[in-house]
Image (cartoon, rainbow, N blue to C red):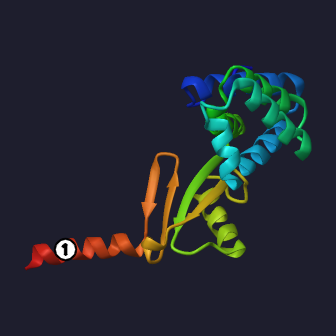
Amino acid sequence: MSADTTNVSGLSGRYATALYDLAESQGVLDQVADDLRSIAEMIDGSDDFERMIRSPIVSRRQQSKAILAVLDKTGISGIARSFVGVAATNRRLFALPDIITDYLAILAGKRGEVTAQVTSAQALTNVQQAELTKALNEAIGQPGGDKVTIKSTVDPDLLGGLVVKLGSRMVDSSLRTKLQHLQLAMRGAG
């Protein structure tokens, strides 16, 4: 089953689709997803690691050797390791973060899962995340389901409230936006 029914495109989409098809044919979709999430955490957690995969100065051989050594040390093996090796050989490590995002999007799309982008003024507690997940599942017609995953970020400039983006829908209940609307309304009243 090809992954071409999702909204991924470009270089990262082609690589992600190929990886998805390979993982699906070998029945290791979740293992590959877990490995890719680990790699994404490593990239996000280390500026040096990110610079290494994006650097045009580091040779193909050096990049390949370095990233495979890191993957071996962290226990990432199988298809994910081989795939990253191919990406390094093809000089495509710079696209790895986008490939990971696209692979996870394909996987979620095939499973009917949706990721909600939630921005809040303060970090959400576990209870708040659980309540929000429940409310979003109900909003998409999956009460008691687990089709919605929350990816949360913190933006102190919001002052309070939330901005929730679910697919193409966005709900902005932030205090900053409410104050902006009030300011605009007051300009018109005077």
Q: Dot 1, crowdedness within 10 Å: few (<14), some or many (≥20)?
A: few
Specify the amino acid type for callout 1: Ala
Looking at the rendered image, the quarter that the N terminus falls into is top right
Establish if 47 lies above or below 119: above
Residue 91 picture quarter: top right
Q: Residue furthest left?
A: 190
Asked whether residue 50 appears in the rendered view, the answer is yes
Residue at 61% x, 31% y is 57
- As rendered, which of 134 and 43 lies closer to the eye? 43
Where 10 sits versus 34, above or below? above
Residue 140 visible in the displayed image: no
Residue 47 horizontal/vertical position (percent): 65, 51
Q: Secondary structure at mark 1?
A: helix
Q: Quadrant of residue 113?
A: top right
Could you tell me residue 60's position as x and y percent?
71, 24
Give left or right: position of 177 versus 38.
left
- Residue 87 image point, x, y percent: 72, 25
Rendered view: 23 above or below 118? above
Snapshot quadrant of residue 92: top right
Which residue is found at the position 67% from the left and 35% from the top? 96
Q: Who's the residue at 82% across and 41% down the image? A: 35
Q: Quadrant of the C terminus?
A: bottom left
Residue 99 spot, x, y in % from top left: 65, 33
Residue at image coords 66%, 68%: 129
**Residue denoted by label 1:** 185
Q: How many marks?
A: 1
Residue 33 left/right relative to 7: right
Front residue of this view, candidates 89 and 82: 89
46 or 142: nearer the viewer: 46
